[in-house]
Amino acid sequence: MRAAVIQFPGSNCDYDVLYVLNKQLGIKADLVWHRYFRHNNYDFAILPGGFSYGDYLRAGAIAAQSPAMRELKEMVNEGKAVLGICNGFQILVESGILPGALLMNDCLTFVCKWVTLQVSSNKSSATTLIQKDKILRMPVAHSEGRYVNEKHGIKELYENEQIIFKYVCNSTDDFNPNGSMENIAGICNLERNVVGLMPHPERASESAISPQCSNDGLMIFESMIEYSKK
Amino acid sequence: MKINLTSNELNQVKILLGREPNIVELGMIDVMWSEHCSYKSSKLELKKIPTKGRRVIVGPGFDSGIVDLGDGDVVAFKIESHNHPSAIDPYNGAATGIGGIIRDILCTNCRPIALLDSLRFGKLEKGHNRWLFQNVIRGIADYGNCCGIPTVAGEIEFDPSFERNCLVNVACSGIGKKENIVLGKMENPGDILVLLGGSTGRDGIHGVTFASKTIDERSEEDRPSVQVGDPFMKKIVIEATLEALSTRYVRGLKDLGGGGLTCALSEMSDKGGVGAEINIDKIHIREADMAPFELMISESQERMLFVIKPEGLNKILKIFDKWEIKYSIIGKVTNTKKVVVKKDKQIIASLPPKILTEVPPIRRKSRKPNYLKKFPKKFELKQKPKNLSQAIYELLMMPTIASKQYIYQQYDHEVGIRTVIRPGEADAAVLRILGKNKAIAMKTDCNSFHTYLDPYYGHAGAVAESIRNIVVTGAEPIAIADCCNFGNPENPEVFWQFKRSIDGLSYMLNGLDIPCIGGNVSFYNEDERTSTAVKPTIVIAALGLIDDLNHITTLGLKESNQAIIIIGKTYNEIGGSQFSIRFNGIGGKVANAKHDREKASMNAVLSSIRKGYITASHDCSKGGLAIALAKMAINGGFGAIVDIKKIPKTSMNPYELLFSESHGRFIVSSRIEDVGKILKICKDNNASVSLIGKTNDEGTIKFSIGKETIANCEIKKMRKCWKNGIQKYIN
């Protein structure tokens, strides 16, 4: 089993994801410079968070034009698992691999806080080991995370069970950190091998660094590994 | 060309040089002799500060101080101001402040892992202050977030003296290996000089001279002196630099900040006792037709000067090419002991580095300020709050005390997966060292309401408070860095404040045996129109080491039916307190921080935490005991009842007991069965201590004198006040 963490100029959660895969899960994972990425060498790939190309133009828009994305599309077509976290999700949307768009948060500022998620579907490469409706705790940290889609696009997401994660209410605080439609936090493609989400599972993979000792994020990476065994 | 040297200084230059400097040299000397680069007014005073300690590897004088964490791990730590640029262009000013401090850490070959911000503004009621406040926060957020360095802690104060001169101080820490430390030095003639990163333009020209004068009506014209940052370029510079350093072909490295290329060349060659020669035609530029002196003093951002072993040059350039980052090979290290600048093969400047780096100090006059005479020494309550419960609610609403969630929610405080304690969870941020059972704790502090009334004890207190804040998380304090912010040093009253402040700070550091490993001085924070200087403010950034992650302690109350214990004695010291400011105005006796009391309390708390007896801990500072306990209740969701008669004290006035800001105090909670053990540890350490109450799940904080209840506050209402204190001014 070999995983690629694709590094774009401006990625900044690359080492964090690498740490979880290598040190916590004992998976062979490489940090791969975007120009050097070749899909044949890997069983699954992760696009980490950050500010690829400084988020200039639109978050993820320039990285979506990287040669790495041609390779990644090959990988997607082969049915291998791909996960986009935060900026990685934005890149997947910008490159058309996932539907919809991610716009400026409705509060108009960057938001970093822990949120509560519900696993809306476990039929995806990132949730195959997680029970449907399970509640997960992990942090978000983004400016452009408000998921939007056209009316029929949202309808299709529901019909095809493509909504994978939703923000849900856990207290009196605003539970949806960005105003996304239908409280969407993460979705998958029709083939269910590509998942993108705004929250950061790599930041919730160890109880030592979680406010409520959550290591819920780990299950997402474990699911990817399990999915890739097939 | 604008020259800021006085005629007296110009004469000194001619004598030292033995000739008239030419125009390029004059430009170079002019920036290096500015207050900002030369520390000419402050350096005689700064010598008093203790800088040595068993963990200190690099002290003041380099880009950042470095301390030893053991097992080969080191931490680089530094704090700097970016006040003047932020007062004119808050977004870019604050952003480039972050940029500068990151480079200081980076060039020691440590990876920057955390940022802290200490901010001071005028009151939020005024639109101008809200504009500064919101844009400074956004500048810090956009820059730090994009670079992938979490902003994990800080502090903020609101006071009219910061209205035209907001203070923006930022600290950064980085983690590295002792064996890999690189310093800002040139040592081997023949080594190649490579300028990496942003192209050089006219932005930031005379940034340091701008920072060395007061703000007046013409300051708007200085807007071009504010550098414009590019956090994306910075992120690339960070990664490319760390990759280049990993080859071990880099012998020296320095960031280009204040004074630009001139500062880097002169300081690096001077430290290694060598010379340097560069060709300015080689520098990659952003604007054509820049005069040579402009190239030499430009403060364009995101630039680093590499000193590279010739045999490794190609390997390093390949790394820069991979990152698609601009660079130019501008010259080499020589044995001439001169900084030589060439253009078209002609020498256009040739100066011994010492003339640039060893600027003669100025002995400034000092005089006790008049304003201190007008304050009443005795505290008299002119305007009594309706009742004590109401006073607590109102204090919680004061922006200086209120929740800072509006700010820290805009900062990515999680990136890097090191953050164990986030903003709001304890008195200091705690970040783990990946792969080890170790962590570092960091916090910045200063109480400018205290320092204004008493610069000496105010700053002794700033040191004590910052250190208490890291101790309560379970950390052993190991070093501090300081950032001085004052008015015009040519004014004897301001210089008196500065001198007394340094004396007070040194007194506390010596007493606690903690070294200062670096600092920064920002003068001329003064509004010329109103001749208002900022309140004297030396922000202390404290660094501590936690040697077992299990010791980490937070401030929220954890359970009902636990003991509430106060450690340290409460004195009749309500002058300059938030209570006094809210209800009485400024005046009275400021809390006197004494090192023996601090040491006793700190040792007692740290031993108790390490033995596992303490379930929650909080330092007692702004707002006194009442606010400290209120925050513990708001955070943990448990209530408490406290008998203030039991507090170790010198006075019986309930206002003083609840709101005095005496130093050396901690409030802790513990399981009932551990109370005796904590009391014994305190006794062994000569710390005053008393069991004053118990936690409960009644949803209120109740203060009593014996059986008589004097204040009863609902946690729900307190939380609302505290959360809205700043938020209500936004939108």
Image (cartoon, coloured by chain):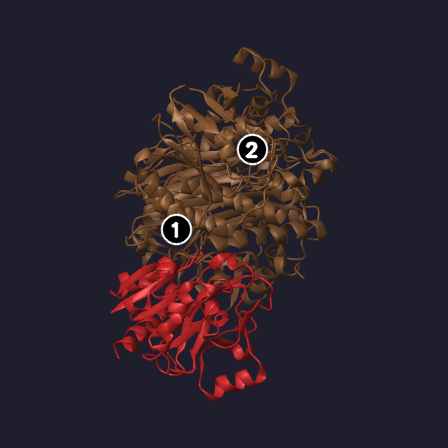
Chain colours: A red, B brown
Measured along the vertical axis of the image, is residue A199 above or below residue B482?
below
- The reply to whether residue B662 is visible in this rendering is no
Disc 2 crowd, CA 10 A, few/some/many (<14, 14-19, 20+) = many
Q: Chain of mark 1?
A: B
Percent position (x, y) of residue B12? 57, 14
Horizontal arrangement in the rendering, residue A182 relative to residue B215 (left or right): left
**Disc 2 versus disc 1: distance between alpha carbons?**
27 Å
Tell me which amino acid carries mark 2: Leu
Q: Chain of mark 2?
A: B
The quarter of the picture where residue B2 lies is top right
Q: Nearer the viewer, residue B343 or A138?
A: B343
Percent position (x, y) of residue B584? 68, 46
The mark found on residue B238 in the picture is none
Helix, strand or loop at mark 1: helix
Disc 1 crowd, CA 10 A, few/some/many (<14, 14-19, 20+) = few
Helix, strand or loop at mark 2: helix
Q: Nearer the viewer, residue B707 or B318?
A: B318
Percent position (x, y) of residue A135? 41, 77
The mark found on residue B295 in the picture is 2
The mark total stands at 2
Q: Quadrant of the C terminus of chain B?
A: bottom right
Q: Which residue is mark 1?
A: B322
Question: What residue lies at 25% left-to-right and 76% top-to-bottom?
Answer: A229
Tell me which amino acid carries mark 1: Lys
Whether pointer 2 and pointer 1 mark residues with C-beta atoms closer than 8 Å, the reply is: no
Q: Nearer the viewer, residue A61 or B467?
A: A61
The quarter of the picture where residue B374 lies is top right
Pointer 2 or 1: first along the chain: 2
